[in-house]
Amino acid sequence: MESPHKQVTNLLVVIFFSAFLLTGCSEPIRKASTGLCPRIKDSAQAIAKLNQDCENTIAIKAGGRMILEYYDDRDDLQKHNLDITLRFYPPDRLFFRGIVFPVEVVRLGTNSSELWVMFSPKEMSRYYWGQRPEADVCLKGQVLSPGRMIEAMGVVNVDTEGTLTSLEQMDVLTLNLKSGKMKRIYIDRCDSLIKMIEYLDAGGNIETVTELDDYQKVGNSFVPAKVVITELQNHTYVELNLRNIKPFEPTEAQLEGKLFKRPEPKGFKDVYKLTGNCRLEVQQITN
């Protein structure tokens, strides 16, 4: 029987390419920008800037397209080109879904107390949910997880110390996470925007790379309209192209109603609750 950790990983196994053999500590992926701009003074300044940007983040809404390719449980390659809908109300309300009309293929979301990830195609009919903050930890390393999706919008909150290095026209903030893993955040000196995030395992091997591009100014915030997430070890690829990014001014009914409320798991073949220590508790449902 697969371990609970393996089951959670299989939930979000998505493939496109893996051109890297990860042995030893990975070198930073080089991503240059043009121009000569001043460096960030030190890691404290970089962290303060990221956290200030988080505080200044406004609520947004967007549509767009998503490329999603993955292997199902039979190791058959599945490909989807989805219409997506995004709603984000900081700091903790997220609604994201991808549809191949009329079927909703994927949905994920959070509110202040719960998170959920749903896959509805026939080849992967699964529903995962859990109470926060415990469930955040379980899904934190997954490509299609609420926390990872929020960071893919350039919203990165830092609650640990870091070290700052320089790479061409990028300042690179490296964070040692409480889980023993690491995160590298590439900040463009000329516009102070995050251009790439590398997620590394405890051995220093790159697990996932998130690239952020084509930033759009929305209110006083900047939102990347193009996001490419590549999960190297499990051969994962997701591409998001956001359109019509606008400020989101939800009604009270939207904030407290169905938009940010965990949907009932009706119609799903497999339903799991993420419990303590990332254990999966099989849920019985009534369709």
Image (cartoon, rainbow, N blue to C red):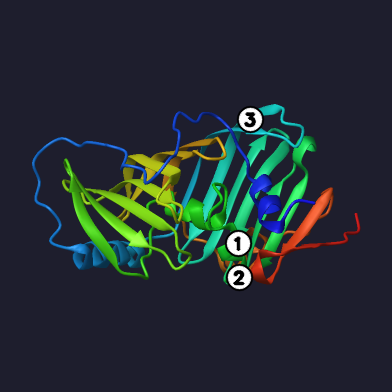
Mark 2 — residue?
Answer: 134
Mark 1 surroundings: few (<14), some (14-19) or many (≥20) residues within 10 A? many
Mark 3 → mark 2, Cα distance in angstroms: 30 Å
- Residue 159's image quarter? bottom left
Mark 3 → mark 1, Cα distance in angstroms: 25 Å
Q: Between label 3 and label 1, give the one nearer the viewer.
A: 1
Q: Identify the image quadrant of the C terminus.
A: bottom right
What amino acid is at disc 3?
His
Instruction: Please say whether residue 1 is visible from this viewpoint.
Output: yes
Q: What residue is rendered at 49% in x and 53% in y?
A: 148
Residue 250 or residue 125, whichever sits in front: 125
Q: What residue is rendered at 75% in x and 43% in y?
A: 120
Instruction: Please say whether residue 262 is visible from this viewpoint.
Output: no
Q: Between label 3 and label 2, give the one nearer the viewer.
A: 2
User: Eyeballing the image, is 21 above or below 285?
Assistant: above
Percent position of residue 236, x then y: 55, 37
Mark 3 — residue?
Answer: 80
User: Eyeballing the image, is 179 above or below 174?
Assistant: below
